Image (tube, rainbow, N blue to C red):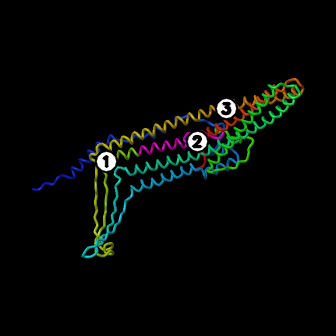
Amino acid sequence: MRIRPPYGAVALAVAASLLAGCQSLTAIDHQQQMDSALSQLPQWQSEASSDSEVLLTELVSDPQLTAILQQAQQANLGLQQSLLSLQIVYAQRKQTRGNRLPSVSAGVTAKDSDAGTEHTAELTVSWELDLWQKLADADTAAKMQIASSEASWQQAQDLLAANVIRGYLDYVQQQQLLNIEQARLTLLKNNEAVILDRYRAGLGDLEALDNAKSNTQSTQATIARYQQALSNSRRTLAQLTGQSQLELTQRVNFPEVTLPLVSLPEQDMRRRPDLQSAYFTTQAAYYDAKVAYKAMLPSLSLQAALNDGSDSLRDALFTSPAWSLLGQLTAPLYQGGKLKAAAEIAELQSAQSYWKYREALLGAVLEVEAALDNERNLKQEAEHLQLAYASAERSADNYLNKYRKGLVNIVDLISVQQQQFNLQSQLVQANYNRLVNRIDLGLALGLGVTS
């Protein structure tokens, strides 16, 4: 008597052993840990309430800057590359989603022989059943990667806007510093002419004349440096807008930059696109790890085929084709440990993404705290410099009156006037640093632009 081998029992035993071996292989989801870490962050309360979200571009009110920001968002070359990267991720998602759908293929062949031409037509439909949700996890990982890329795209737009505002403030700063040095040069030339006349009249010495000429030449060198800095600032703005040249109207004073903490009802680090990107990247890595683990499980695929052959192409395509149905169960029994190693690597990469998120979270908190400290210190610096400049201005006026009365010499007058110009330049630089820090603070708090 012929004994049939127990194929069904063998298959069940193989499947049971595979499932038992994979029970301990489970991907770790870090979502709860990330949410817990985010909820423990300090909240920076505002001094005034606001019902709507504040944009980074709304911190500065300047028509010329608004136009530059619009040009940059439309034509910045780096931003266009970031947009293409996002579109690539969208296309990759379509590839992943296609793995969950049936595939259909058709073919027609013709074979010539002595008996004539024989045509063969075939239509095949194949589909892998998603028994363990492996394909669904791969699709979810692709969704998370899209969300991460969208956050990176938002970050690129926000960073571009911040760089444009910084560049515009630097342009105004360089223009103000140049104006100060030009006013200093005019005064120094007048003083030099007075000293020269006194020297020719025998009322002054050569040392005072040389000192006056030295101050004049030094200021001219400073003017040349500021002119170059102004040109560089204009070129930087042009590059950010994707142009080779940019026409700018001269602005004498800084535009007002609102302190972000006054505008926001509550500071929430979830606003930051870099944290959002790191969060979704970690989630994508988690689902990738699940896919890697499930690659060690059996897979079931179905295939249905219609085929026929005839000496007529029409009959081969449309007349009584034969059909067949094939079910295939495959399981990876031994591949030298490659699948297990791949799963371990995916799990380690998931953990690595989690710690990168924690690092980004810590960096974000420190950025906000540093910007807040800078705001306080820069405010004090600007206030002290403002008082010092006011005193120097009064002192220069007093010395000028005394000089006209012959109570002080011109060397003392020049020294006081130099101090006044120096303090004025320091005040401009301090105001610039404070305004730029407010932009940095807004960026650190997650303020951005509309996508």
Q: Is 271 one of the magenta-colored residues?
A: yes
Farthest residue, direction right:
405
Q: Amino acid at mark 3?
A: Leu
**Which numbered disc flags the more N-terminal residue, 3 or 1?**
1
Q: Is residue 427 above or below residue 326?
A: above
Question: Cβ–Cβ below 8 Å for labels 2 and 3?
Answer: no
Q: Amino acid at mark 2?
A: Gly
356 and 262: which is toward the camera: 356
Question: Cβ–Cβ below 8 Å for labels 1 and 2?
Answer: no
265 and 25: which is toward the camera: 25
Which residue is located at x 21 percent, y 50 percent?
9
Of the two numbered discs 3 and 1 in the rendering, the one whose residue sits closer to the viewer: 3
Which residue is located at x 30 percent, y 68 percent?
307
- Identify the residue under disc 2: 446
Farthest residue, direction left:
1
Q: Which mark is residue 297?
A: 1
- Identify the residue under disc 3: 378
Please state the horizontal and vertical placement of residue 186, each as a whole percent of the image. Answer: 80, 36
Q: Quadrant of residue 95?
A: bottom left
Q: Secondary structure at mark 2?
A: loop
Q: How many marks?
A: 3
At label 1, counting other C-alpha atoms closer than 10 Å, the crowd grade (few under 14, some 14-19, many 20 or more) is: some
Q: Secondary structure at mark 1?
A: loop
Of the two numbered discs 2 and 3 in the rendering, the one whose residue sits closer to the viewer: 3
Q: CA distance from mark 2 to mark 3?
A: 22 Å
Please state the horizontal and vertical placement of residue 75, each as a whole percent of the image. Answer: 60, 52
Which residue is located at x 76 percent, y 32 percent?
421
Q: Is 54 one of the magenta-colored residues?
A: no
Left-right relation of 390 to 77: right
Q: Amino acid at mark 1?
A: Leu
Q: Which residues are magenta?
A: 261-287
